Amino acid sequence: MFIELLERAKTTPGIADATAMTLATTGADGRPSARIVLLKGADADGLVFYTNTLSRKGREIAAHDDVALLFWWPPLESQVRFEGRAVPVSDADADAYFATRPRISQLGAWASAQSEPLASREELERRFAALEKQYEGKSVPRPPHWSGYRVAPLSVEFWWNRPGRLHDRELYTRAAPGAPWTKSLLNP
Ligand SMILES: Cc1cc2nc3c(=O)[nH]c(=O)nc-3n(C[C@H](O)[C@H](O)[C@H](O)COP(=O)(O)O)c2cc1C
């Protein structure tokens, strides 16, 4: 059901990027944080995104792997909420996806110590220029700190706009990945 909706969102005019989703994580202090990441794979095993594993989100997931993902597609008048555990993808999957990225993004993955303080824009550009030289004429390997996570949802909620704020909310839950889904309705 989600995959069909995602495919519809991808071809619906007015949706700039249907794969943009909010990822919420929890810090060691219990405080939530959220940011947008791009969905790079969705199938029966879960939803995949890629990032720097030493970033704030990466560090938070390492300590606490429960996450939430959220899509809002205004022209479809729908919201989809996921909750589940983020599990690192295999090195082979990460290598395969990294190899498809534009060279500039591959070098950027090396240049950016994502989420760490940066003294100046120039510092980042200097690092990038040095990497361009270092890898001139060579392919860029995947940095060890750049990989992906697969979120196998334990709950999925579809929200559909309806008149009078009497929206439809369908909640699907399961006890574990692979277990059968239970459907229920929620008050709007
Ligand atoms: C449209 C959009 C797409 C993005 N996609 C990604 C992504 O796929 N992976 C990623 O690491 N950051 C992505 N970002 C940047 C993140 O929102 C965030 O700034 C960065 O990952 C650092 O987050 P953190 O400090 O919470 O770890 C995207 C930002 C935007 C606005």
Image (tube, rainbow, N blue to C red):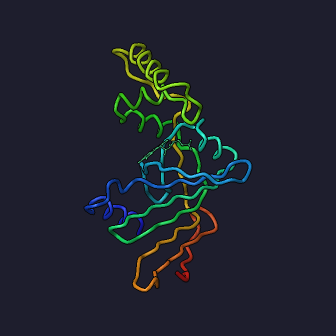
In this rendering, would 37 be left or right of 85?
A: left
Quarter of the image where one finds residue 128: top left
- Count all numbered tags in the image, as a single digit: 0
Residue drawn at x 46%, y 82% as measured from the top left: 165
Give x and y (percent) for residue 120.
Answer: 51, 25
In this rendering, would 137 be left or right of 35?
A: left
Q: Nearer the viewer, residue 67 or 97?
A: 67
Give x and y (percent) for residue 99.
Answer: 39, 32
Quarter placement of the N terminus: bottom left
Q: Nearer the viewer, residue 11 or 100?
A: 11
Vertical relation: 159 (above or below) 28: below
Vertical relation: 75 (above or below) 105: below
Residue drawn at x 73%, y 47% as measured from the top left: 28
**Most extreme residue toward the front, as rendered?**
120
In this rendering, would 159 be left or right of 178?
A: left
Quarter of the image where one finds residue 12: bottom left
Residue drawn at x 47%, y 48% as measured from the top left: 37
**Most extreme residue toward the right, as rendered?**
29
Give x and y (percent) for residue 123.
Answer: 49, 21
Vertical relation: 17 (above or below) 144: below
In this rendering, would 92 be left or right of 84?
A: left
